[in-house]
Image: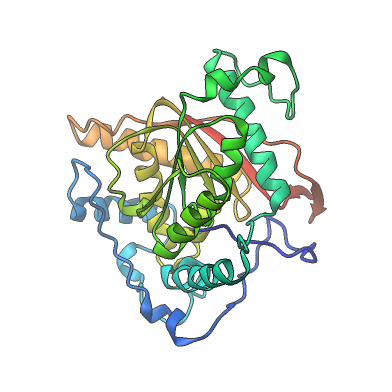
Amino acid sequence: MAGIRLGADDSEVSQQSRAAPPDLISDDDRSIAADSWSIKSDYGSTLDDDQRHADAAEDLSAANLRAPFDYSSDKEEPDSDGVTSMLGLQSYWDAAYADELVNFREHGHAGEVWFGADVMGIVAAWTKTLCIDVSQGRTPNHVDNIKSDAIEQGYKYLSGWSVLDIGTGNGLLLQELSKQGFSDLTGIDYSEGAIDLSRNLADRDGLPNINFLVDDILDSKLERQFQLVVDKGTLDAIGLHPDGAIKRLIYWDSVSRLMVPGGILVITSCNSTKDELVQEVENFNQRRIGMTQDQEGCKDAASQLKYLSHVRTYPTFMFGGSVGSRVATVAFLRN
């Protein structure tokens, strides 16, 4: 799964005021009916699925959102009171990456660089600096693009970091992180076409050691945890599914379980601002606290995320009296 791009001429659309992305395709093989998402989550919680579903419904109710059983995963019309899009459906991405594979095999094209190559480069370099700071026990200095001997010699710290890219798409972000000095790299995507493309590109570009796996972050079968988890657009796409509200709740549960204590999540979004992501994480933490109180012995319930830092160098613009940017990259630390 990749991210959601904003066009270069969409200057009147900000993260504070977002319109629904247009339906990009209409052919039958990408129809909504072809996508049959399930609320079922089976990634090792001490709560059964019915209880998880009930907890999520209660959380949505408290936030004045519709309960999950009010959503239909196969409906053809988007919600009138929420933003949905074909970009939220696995059937869309399966068809998109089938096309990308054809383009790669016929022309050698790598496919789309979601959010653009400039943003990808900023994310990779900033993440490198952040991880070196954490490795050396330093508080992030909140200044981007720092150049120092310590940073330039930071490869020895990065080689031991295990990295997971969720919704890896064509895997180009992992290639960029490899150039920054990370070496234990894994990318997952629920689209087999995306994994085929990412493997082909990595082999072509001389990076066969990057591990790519078909796996759904909402129902992950991974049996290891990672020191660094990166997301460039996956949460955005999840939120555009008709069941996006409940799927976002499951997303935070699943991501936190894949992070080691002291691990870092770096998430890049064009549909949420930095403050919105921080608030969403705070809501997740409050839900975890409630689970701890209600479920004695729930070993994962106490795991929480806290804001660590964010990229400050993206271009900004004024809209409706507020200053915003097209993209937000925010880092969270797991306790």
Residue 188: x %, y % from top left? 41, 50
Q: Number of marks in the image? A: 0
Question: Looking at this view, is 226 or 72 the one in front?
Answer: 226
Quarter that holds the C terminus:
top left
Q: How is the image coloured?
A: rainbow
Place residue 243 in its image quadrant: bottom left
Q: Is residue 47 visible?
A: yes
Determine whether, in the image, residue 104 is placed left or right of residue 321. Answer: left
Residue drawn at (29%, 34%), measured in percent from left and top? 301
* 244 is higher (above) or lower (below) than 140: below
Residue 96: x %, y % from top left? 52, 71
Place residue 181 in its image quadrant: top right
Residue drawn at (54%, 54%), measured in percent from left and top? 201
Residue drawn at (80%, 62%), measured in percent from left and top? 11
* 206 is higher (above) or lower (below) than 99: above
Residue 8: x %, y % from top left? 78, 63
Residue 76: x %, y % from top left? 43, 82
* 294 is higher (above) or lower (below) than 214: above
Determine whether, in the image, residue 198 is placed left or right of residue 205. Answer: left
Residue drawn at (79%, 46%), measured in percent from left and top? 315
Question: Looking at this view, is 69 or 61 the one in front?
Answer: 69
Q: Is residue 81 visible?
A: no
